[in-house]
Image (spheres, grey):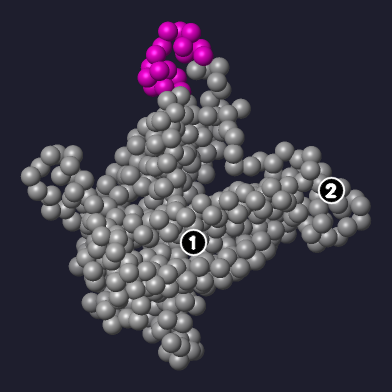
Amino acid sequence: MGDLDFSFLASSNTQAYLWRGLQYTLQLTVVAAIGGTIWGTLLAMARLSSFKAMAWVASAYVNLMRSIPLLLVIFWFYFLSPALIQWVTQADRPPQIGADRSAYITFILFEGAYFCEIMRAGIQSIPRGQVGAAQALGLNYWQAMQLVILPQAFRNMLPVLLTQTIILFQDVSLVSLLNVTDFIGASSKYAQGTGKIVEMYLFDAVAYFSMCFALSLLVKRLQKRIAIVR
Amino acid sequence: MNFGIFLEQVPDGDGTWLMSLASGLKYTFGVAGFAWIIAFGLGSVLGVMRTTQSKAAVALGNAYVELFRNIPLLVQFFIWYFVLPGMIPGVKKWVISLDPTTHQFVTAIICLGLFTAARISEQVRAGIQSLPRGQSLAGLAMGLTQAQTYRYVLLPVAYRIIIPPLTSELMNLIKNTAVAYSIGLVELFFRTREMGEMTFRYFEAFAAATAAYVVIAMVANRVMAFIEKRTAIPGFISGGTGGGGH
């Protein structure tokens, strides 16, 4: 233990390199959390819809995403994204898209399945009478959702959504296995280049722990505040 | 698309691609099985500790859960695989004496076992705490010791309540074995990638792996639902996974 040398972390080059990796990780986390919540909310509405076919498709999608490993999904979309984008934009040829960018699609679509289950629970936690009341006031489905149900569902589920976002933040590390330079990718490349493997991964563990632990404490405080108001 | 590829021979291997994937699946199940034993045992102990009156036991249990929940699984794999042998010469000596596959296999079991234990302890704690306080007080009033109260009163009901979340944890564990790919363990995902890379049949390889994981999930769900039904206490309304609404 005595011969560990962390002095390389003081170098501004190292710091800049790791910071760029962390920036990517944070960016991907935020985009996927927002995109995943929107996609997940739509899925939840589909799952709860009275159109049987739509409910079935949405639940099949969610169950599929939840039964396969994230790593497999990351690689799936890495290979499928170019074809998918070509199909959406009707381009002549598949666009060149790197793993760092296909990861955005992956995480939005994958996390959407998990956010869907959270939002479904949130929507179901609203008493049915509110839907009836909204209809009695003459609101249509979208108005009732947008003005009555979803604001309350979001509020009730906010701590759970944020906890899922912390998990997402940790899951982003898996993109490093596709050679993407996220925080862990940057660390791995640096560690392999300099041989500082032990020190680097210890630093990563401490860094992730401090960030996630601090965030989870914040979520706990938020949960208490929301609970009192409710 | 050409699904005949699965029957083609693996170059410098001794079998078809289908057999290669099957051997990966064997490692996936092997790691998940052993890790589940560690996770269930340790998770139960930690979960019980966190419901006792002892402040030290609660703090220790909580610290364990926070530690293992706030570090990404991938980093935990690196810690067990690279950092531990690098820091402790005794471990390094032992690890070098091992066959690399054995080293990866053991590392994956320990890493996933300890990681999943934190999650199971959460479920066990929640299960015990969901029981009315009167149950444990009644046990003590009957003259049972605290250990007996847990063994005969609290845990038999708590475990039944948490069968659905334990099912999810088992599924998560099986899915998480794919992360062992990062240390080179030849489990299902490793074999899938290898097949994709060597044959350029990525679609077929990934489709096969996806199908395998989906079937595993469905079977595990059915098995756990069966266990839930068989162990249900007559007269109790089980929490259950089905249903919904109010």
Closer to the N terminus: mark 2 or mark 1?
2
Count of numbered badges drawn on the protein = 2
Badge 2 is on which residue? Answer: B137
Dot 2 falls on which chain? B
Q: Which residue is drawn at 45% across and 65% down?
A: B177
Look at the image and give the residue range highlighted in magenta: A132-150
**Does residue B94 show up?**
yes
- Left-right relation of B160 to A229: right
- Secondary element at tag 2: helix
Whether B176 is drawn above or below A225: the answer is below
Q: Which of B69 and A118 is in front in this view?
A: A118
**Tags 2 and 1 both on a single chain:** yes
Q: In which quarter of the image is residue A204?
A: bottom left
The residue type indicated by label 2 comes to Leu
- Left-right relation of A73 to B87: left
Is-magenta flag for residue B23? no
**Does residue B191 show up?**
no
Q: Nearer the viewer, residue B47 or B120?
A: B120
